[in-house]
């Protein structure tokens, strides 16, 4: 079957939050639209058209990326984690800290912000305030002025650090 | 008015940073914004004018209609036939504008046609296939362009590009000038900016053919007014439109007037057999969503030599772009804070709303008051410099004193409470003012340009609607109010339905805290769905999330409805227990005898009597446990030109910004930023803190980064977040906060506004700091934004930013 550009539809297979997905997609379909409309995972948001706002951030093969800057066909074979995959039951420590620190207002940037924080803490479990601010440079929040978000990520890092230490 | 002790039976929750009930859905990605609603929809895309000013001669839809996947198209001509023009609120000259351009386009981005297709990709493809024949006209871009005698007319029928022109005088301005030792005059230019909520405008419209009616889902901030506007414009009865507002991803005023697009979507939905969805793109949002108007403000202060300000004269010209609905209101709302924190006794104002070929303007966070505080607080600094006074001293000499509260300004605004001098002193202590001054002097010796900027602001809330009708006869809306329904569930828990919506403020949490303390229960037992459905929500024309009215009238409605339910439960309990009402107490989900606590009945049992065992109710008691209440602000007066009371609560704050300016690159870096604010009694300090900081960052962006730039042809040059720069986590300071609490005597809980908060005083605080830093170069700041380019040029050549 031809897609909207007259090219053959492409079949992609990928893993999202540990589940296998397989779809025929239009070659120009953006990954963020795939996640939202085909996989029906609407926690990943769209806030701009140019890769500036970070509301669509997901973990793509271990790295935090903006899913509006990637085509769905490029995700063939990829392993993706979205906000819905952060904690199967209950809350991930980052999610919990966002609640503790009042880091959420309208909530629209929140999933992308949490995914960026998740990407940061995977690489740097003990970031400084400056490193946290750098890590979320690609995520716009129009409500909070960032301060409580930075505090939340810092608290989450400590929480995760503590639980790692107490592991047998 | 009820006293606090009559309202709250416990003090366990109000005033505490209770974790937000809303957040669990938001952090898990389970929110339901309009675009997330799981519906089988067609998608719409809108063709927008590439010209600022042009006649439309012909639109050819043939190719677009032929594209596979396109299901419907709509043009401005059809809209003009099917709908009424957009209604105006403040302007006094006739100007006819439809929700889509029919014969003439008036700004780049004005809707010209719309397409519905199977998906958004195809709809966008179809836009490229629509052929429009335009005849470009000379555009009117700036205020200066618009006011030229031979300027082209944006609306020919108006006969002028000035759609509102008014002069007002309050107090004896002539006498103030006679008594003055000096008069200082300055011209300021404030640019266009916007708070750009991260979720763009979003609408789904469904037409139900059998009943000839519409259901619309939209992230509309002011659904009460929108419902009326949409129905009037479509010419349908109110019951033919059900408006549902799900989660809103930020608003800041920018979603107050998206209703013209609901009209467009409704017309599109009528043409097809499925719901139609339109999600505004960011480019559309920046291009033709809504902005705060750019303004030219000429201001004069009449002063005594000791720094006392006797009078203020102002000519305020707003470039309102092309949107007749809200044009004119920015100038008028400034009266809410025109004399700031000061005892200025007289003011003379001239207001002009100018129409140009720029994008629409709507009430962006603070609505004109950021500009007002900016020009006033800049002038106070300029006066201090002229008189050789410290910026602190001149403010202390002019502040309204706490013993003068409630204080009525010359135009009729009532400042109900507050201690402005103490607020300033507290801010100076917080930031370490004296130490900073030394640091500044040492820095200058080493070629480091450090500046300290102070700004004191009144932060009004709860709009007294109708103020914008000064020259239009009887207002359509007056005062301010909200509605709420409070019910006890069968199991004794409480549910609340509010007439208003939430766009990030945590209303469900705050409401639960208040209701919990009113009934002696835990906030976990109080549920509230912050969504609105016009079929069931207790809304009125004022309903919506704007002008920081929540803490006043929204909670007022919740409190009055809860009180009705509480009274009814007490009557039922009294009957059931055989204890007089006056001897009953509310304790942890029970009503008991205050003397013998074992004589008790649970809420669940009371609910059981009210809903099921109704024959056991007291004689004449109505079954059921649900109450509706509408609450209006009690001091709202009908605005008139002499007693021009614009807003009904007045929080205040002092901001102190400390910056270092790199004179080589022109960049402004923050060393410190202190905020002391007084929003009366705080209900949830965790939420308040976020609002105080977030609103300040809006002001920071407006002052240093953001600007909707237009070229001479009226082409917008900043239509992405690459050109329209928002504050990022790295560029904002770590704010130091302190609070004061001067309870408001006219709100039930003593609370005041906090949402617009820092977006008012921050502009002047930062601008004053930059000017202070550049004092060695003699630079004066009279315009915004303060971009690196302007800083470098001012230091080297112009001496003026």
Image: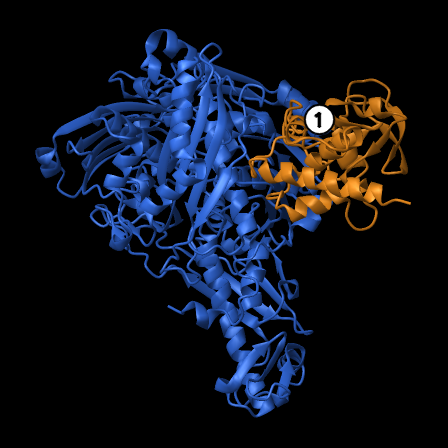
Chain colours: A orange, B blue
Residue B264 seen anywhere in this rendered image of the structure? yes
Across and down, in percent, residue B656 comes to 41, 34
Considering the numbered disc 1 on the image, is that residue within a helix, a strand or a loop?
Answer: helix
Outermost residue, bottom direction?
B578
Q: Is residue A163 above or below residue A138?
A: below
Residue B707 seen anywhere in this rendered image of the structure? no
Across and down, in percent, residue B439 comes to 42, 24
Across and down, in percent, residue B642 comes to 20, 48
Q: Please give left or right for residue A102 compared with residue B794 in the image.
A: right
Q: Chain of mark 1?
A: B
Q: Quadrant of the C terminus of chain B?
A: top left
Which residue corresponds to mark 1?
B121
Q: Residue at x 45, y 25 (%)?
A: B659
Q: Nearer the viewer, residue B304 or B159?
A: B304
Q: Quadrant of residue A29?
A: top right
Q: Nearer the viewer, residue B347 or B777?
A: B777
Q: Please give left or right for residue A40 compared with residue B376 in the image.
A: right
Across and down, in percent, residue B166 comes to 23, 36
Q: Is residue B328 above or below residue B358?
A: below
Q: How many marks?
A: 1
Q: Nearer the viewer, residue B268 or B202?
A: B202
Q: Please give left or right for residue B577 compared with residue B361 in the image.
A: right
Q: Quadrant of the N terminus of chain B?
A: bottom left
Q: Residues within 10 Å of mark 1 (few under 14, many from 20)?
A: some
Q: Residue at x 55, y 80 (%)?
A: B585
Q: Is residue B277 above or below residue A28?
A: below
Q: Residue at x 23, y 46 (%)?
A: B411
């Amino acid at each position: 079957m031809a897609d909207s550009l007259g090219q053959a539809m492409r079949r992609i297979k990928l893993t999202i939050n540990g589940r296998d997905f397989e779809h025929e997609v239009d070659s120009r379909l953006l990954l963020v639209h795939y996640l939202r409309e085909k996989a029906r995972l609407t926690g990943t948001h769209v806030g701009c058209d140019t890769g500036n706002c970070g509301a669509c951030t997901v973990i793509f093969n271990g790295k935090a990326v903006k899913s509006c800057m990637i085509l769905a066909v490029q995700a063939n074979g990829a392993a993706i984690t979205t906000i819905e995959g952060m904690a199967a039951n209950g809350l991930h420590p980052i999610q919990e800290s966002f609640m503790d620190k009042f880091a959420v207002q309208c909530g629209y940037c929140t999933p992308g912000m949490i995914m960026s924080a998740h990407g940061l803490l995977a690489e740097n479990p003990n970031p400084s305030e400056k490193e946290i601010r750098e890590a979320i440079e690609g995520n716009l929040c129009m409500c909070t002025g960032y301060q409580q978000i930075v505090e939340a990520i810092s608290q989450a890092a400590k929480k995760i650090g503590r639980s790692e230490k107490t592991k047998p | 008015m009820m006293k606090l002790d009559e309202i709250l039976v416990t003090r366990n929750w109000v005033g505490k940073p209770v974790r937000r009930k809303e957040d669990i859905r938001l952090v898990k990605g389970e929110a339901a914004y309009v675009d997330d609603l799981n519906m089988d929809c067609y998608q719409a895309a809108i063709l927008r004018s590439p010209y600022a000013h042009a006649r439309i001669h012909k639109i050819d839809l043939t190719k677009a209609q032929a594209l596979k996947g396109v299901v419907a198209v709509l043009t401005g001509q059809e809209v003009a036939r099917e709908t009424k023009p957009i209604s105006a609120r403040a302007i006094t000259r006739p100007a006819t504008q439809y929700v889509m351009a029919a014969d003439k386009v008036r700004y780049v981005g004005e809707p010209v046609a719309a397409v519905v297709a199977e998906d958004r990709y195809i709809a966008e493809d179809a836009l490229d296939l629509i052929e429009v024949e335009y005849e470009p006209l000379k555009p009117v871009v700036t205020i200066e362009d618009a006011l030229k005698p031979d300027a082209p007319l944006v609306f020919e029928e108006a006969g002028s590009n000035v759609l509102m022109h008014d002069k007002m005088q309050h107090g004896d301005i002539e006498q103030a000038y006679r008594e003055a030792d000096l008069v200082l005059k300055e011209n300021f230019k404030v640019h266009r900016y916007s708070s750009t909520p991260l979720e763009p405008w979003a609408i789904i419209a469904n037409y139900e053919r059998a009943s000839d009616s519409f259901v619309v889902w939209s992230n509309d901030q002011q659904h009460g007014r929108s419902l009326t506007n949409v129905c009037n414009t479509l010419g349908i009865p109110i019951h033919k439109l059900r408006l549902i507002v799900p989660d809103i991803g930020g608003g800041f005023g920018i979603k107050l007037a998206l209703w013209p697009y609901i009209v467009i979507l409704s017309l599109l939905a009528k043409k097809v057999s499925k719901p139609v969805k339109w999600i505004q793109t960011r480019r559309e949002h920046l291009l033709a969503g809504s902005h705060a108007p750019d303004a030219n403000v000429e201001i004069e202060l009449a002063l005594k030599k000791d720094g006392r300000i006797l009078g203020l004269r102002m000519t305020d010209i707003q470039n309102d772009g092309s949107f007749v609905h809200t044009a004119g209101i920015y100038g008028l709302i400034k009266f809410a804070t025109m004399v700031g924190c000061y005892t200025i006794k007289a003011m003379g104002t001239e207001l002009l709303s100018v129409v140009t070929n720029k994008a629409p303007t709507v009430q962006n966070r603070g609505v004109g008051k950021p500009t007002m505080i900016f020009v006033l607080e800049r002038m106070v600094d300029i006066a201090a410099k002229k008189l050789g006074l410290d910026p602190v001293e001149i403010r202390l000499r002019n502040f309204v004193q706490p013993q003068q509260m409630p204080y009525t300004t010359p135009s009729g605004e009532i400042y109900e409470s507050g201690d402005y001098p103490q607020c300033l002193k507290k801010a100076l202590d917080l930031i370490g003012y004296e130490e900073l001054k030394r640091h500044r002097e040492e820095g200058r010796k080493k070629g480091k340009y450090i500046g300290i900027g102070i700004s004191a602001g009144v932060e009004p809330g709860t709009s007294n609607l109708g103020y914008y009708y000064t020259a239009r006869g009887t207002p359509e809306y007056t005062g301010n109010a909200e509605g709420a329904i409070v019910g006890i569930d069968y199991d004794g828990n409480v549910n609340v339905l509010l007439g208003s919506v939430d766009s990030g403020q945590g209303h469900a949490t705050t409401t639960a805290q208040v209701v919990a303390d009113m009934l002696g229960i835990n906030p976990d037992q109080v549920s509230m769905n912050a969504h609105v459905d016009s079929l069931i929500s207790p809304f009125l024309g004022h309903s919506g999330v704007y002008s920081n009215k929540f803490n006043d009238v929204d909670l007022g409605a919740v409190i009055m409805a809860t009180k009705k339910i509480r009274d009814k439960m007490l009557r039922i309990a009294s009957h059931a227990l055989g204890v007089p009402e006056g001897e009953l107490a509310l304790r942890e989900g029970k009503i008991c005898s205050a003397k013998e606590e074992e004589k008790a009945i649970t809420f669940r049992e009371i609910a059981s009597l009210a809903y099921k065992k109704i024959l056991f109710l007291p004689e004449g008691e109505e079954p059921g446990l649900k109450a509706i209440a509408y609450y209006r602000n009690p001091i709202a007066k009908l605005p008139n030109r002499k007693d021009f009371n614009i807003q009904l609560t007045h929080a205040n704050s002092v901001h102190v910004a400390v910056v270092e300016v790199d004179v080589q690159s022109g960049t402004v870096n923050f060393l410190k930023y202190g905020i002391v604010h007084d929003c009366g009694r705080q209900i949830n300090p965790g939420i308040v803190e976020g609002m105080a900081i977030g609103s300040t960052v809006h002001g920071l962006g407006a002052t240093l980064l953001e600007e909707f730039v237009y070229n001479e042809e009226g082409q917008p040059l900043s239509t992405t977040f690459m050109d329209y720069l928002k504050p990022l986590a790295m560029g904002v300071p770590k704010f130091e906060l302190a609070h004061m609490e001067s309870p408001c005597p006219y709100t039930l809980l003593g609370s005041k506004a906090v949402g617009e908060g820092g977006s008012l005083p921050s502009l002047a605080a930062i601008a004053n700091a930059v000017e202070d830093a550049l004092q060695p170069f003699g630079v004066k700041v009279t315009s915004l934004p303060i971009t690196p380019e302007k800083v470098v040029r001012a230091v080297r050549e112009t001496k003026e930013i």
